[in-house]
Image (spheres, grey):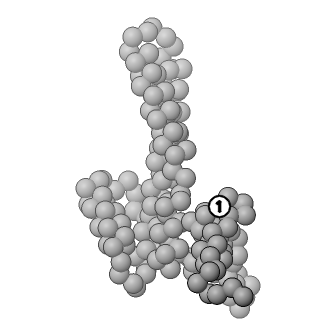
Amino acid sequence: MVSRAEVDLPSLCPLSVQLDGRCSLDRLYFLVNFSKLINFYDENNHVRGSWYELLLKDPAISSAYISKTPYAEAVKEYINLSSKLDELIHSSLHKSSNEMEMNSKIIHVYTQLFFLIERVFLEIFEWYEIINSQLKVYSFRNYFLGAVSYTHLTLPTIYSV
């Protein structure tokens, strides 16, 4: 007979098994993204929200979701666009090229850069709205709301939301 002390309890924990190589944070990130597809409907069958907003009201889920947000692609795109813009501006100053064509390329890169920054700010604003609606006070909430509020006070408003 096996005594309770002889049983290897950590191996019985479901979290110790990774069937598909994902950890708990990965599964929560997937769950939150999937929840965007599950809508709430009113009595007139109109969409009135999704499970996304509901799930992110939980501090543990919202913190896990934010921590797993793949920001590396946005950073890479920002660096590439910034480098391309530097090259175009440098070329326009030192080469006698078609000014209209060069200006058009510069405007195109500026536009891409603007939309990238807008996408990031809208995501941060969405997180802000969700975290701000949480009633529970915790360290990350205080830090995040303070950082966003400070940034809002120190940067000019591009447009009001």
**Is residue 79 shown above or below 55?**
above
Quick check: can you spot residue 96? yes
Q: Quadrant of residue 45?
A: bottom right
Q: If the image is split into quadrants, where does the N terminus sit?
A: bottom right
> Who's the residue at 37% across and 73% down the image?
141
Instruction: Give the total number of marks visible in the rendering.
Output: 1
> Who's the residue at 64% across and 87% down the image?
3
> Who's the residue at 52% across and 27% down the image?
104
Q: Is residue 82 left or right of residue 54?
A: left
Quick check: can you spot residue 126? no
Q: Residue furthest bottom?
A: 43
The x and y percentages for residue 110 are: 47, 36
Q: Amino acid at mark 1?
A: Arg
Few, some or many C-alpha atoms within 10 Å of disc 1 (few <14, some 14-19, many ≥20)?
Answer: few
The x and y percentages for residue 132 are: 40, 76
Q: Quadrant of residue 28?
A: bottom right
Residue linked to disc 1: 22
> Who's the residue at 66% across and 77% down the image?
12
